[in-house]
Amino acid sequence: MNREIIFRAISTETNKFVFGYLVRDEYNTYIRTEDSRYVKVFESTVGQFTGLYDHTKFEAATTEQREYAFDRAKKSGASAEDEWKGIMVFEGDAVKCTEYENIGMREFCGEDIKLFSLEDVKGEVKNQYISSIKWDEGGFYVASDSYYDIFDTGLCCFFGDMIASQPIFEIKVIGHVYNKY
């Protein structure tokens, strides 16, 4: 799988996120933006793009998220709506995770279930929780609030072909864990 390597962090000047490449020297941490500016950032707010997008629809995106989609669309020549894949999921994001029962799995197995849309097989909400995205030991995961972290779930479980998943996972970025900035 090829994915964009992008970092984000909060600027020490504006207290807003900047996106680009991570650069460190012996004293400071910077993000080199697409226009080749070096922006000094708070080291503790650096997070890497996971390569995944959440399930937010374009209509539900914030103005800032839509503007970012418009900027990316300019480069590809597509419209922002066509370019939209959801909100980019970064290390340090706060996420709302929803687990739905897959009612299709009760009735059908194998290739038969592929005849239905995801909305057709999405049943009742079985679990909902707020968590954060972390990086550890070579992978991104949705953090558990368990003391022992034995219930951490690999981020890959929340994406892919949910038609054959039990439960069906949905994830939405709702903020970040850097509230003090």
Image (cartoon, rainbow, N blue to C red):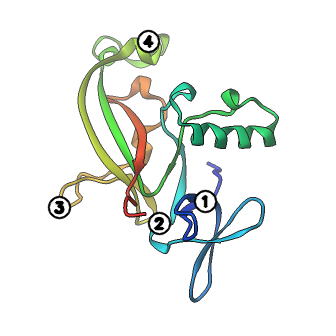
Q: For mark 4, does the 10 Å Cα neighbourhood hold few (<14), some (14 to 19), or many (20 or more) residues?
A: few
Quarter of the view holding residue 7: bottom right
The crowd level at tag 3 (other Cα within 10 Å; few <14, some 14-19, many 20+) is few
Specify few, some or many for label 1: CA neighbours under 10 Å numbering under 14, 14-19, or 20 or more.
many
Q: Which comes before the other along the chain, label 3 or label 2?
A: 2
| Mark 4: secondary structure | helix
Q: Can you name the residue that lies furthest to the front here? A: 14
First along the sequence among labels 3 and 1:
1
Query: Where on the picture, by quarter, is residue 134?
Result: bottom left
Q: CA distance from mark 1 to mark 2?
A: 11 Å
Disc 4 to disc 3: CB gap under 8 Å? no
Dot placed on the residue nearer the N-terminal end, 1 or 2: 1
**Amino acid type assigned to the residue bearing label 3 in the image:** Tyr
Per the image, the residue denoted by label 2 is: 45
Q: Earlier in the sequence, mark 4 or mark 3?
A: 4
Tell me if label 3 and label 1 are in contact, CB under 8 Å: no
Q: Residues within 10 Å of mark 2 (few under 14, many from 20)?
A: some
Please state which amino acid type lies under the numbered disc 4.
Asp
Q: Give the number of the mark in front: 1 or 4.
A: 1
Looking at the rendered image, the disc whose residue lies closer to the viewer, 4 or 3, is 3
**x and y percent of residue 74 in the render?**
79, 39
Counting from the top left corner in percent of width and height, residue 94 is at 38, 49
Residue type at mark 2 is Thr
Q: Is residue 99 above or below residue 15?
A: above
Question: Which residue is labeled 1 in the image?
Answer: 18
Asked whether, in this view, residue 178 is left or right of residue 148, the answer is right
Marks 1 and 4 in Cβ contact (< 8 Å) = no
> In the image, what residue type sits under mark 1?
Val
Reply above or below: 107 against 135: above
Of the numbered discs in the image, which one, if any, rests on residue 147? 3
Labels 3, 2: front one: 2
Residue for badge 4: 112
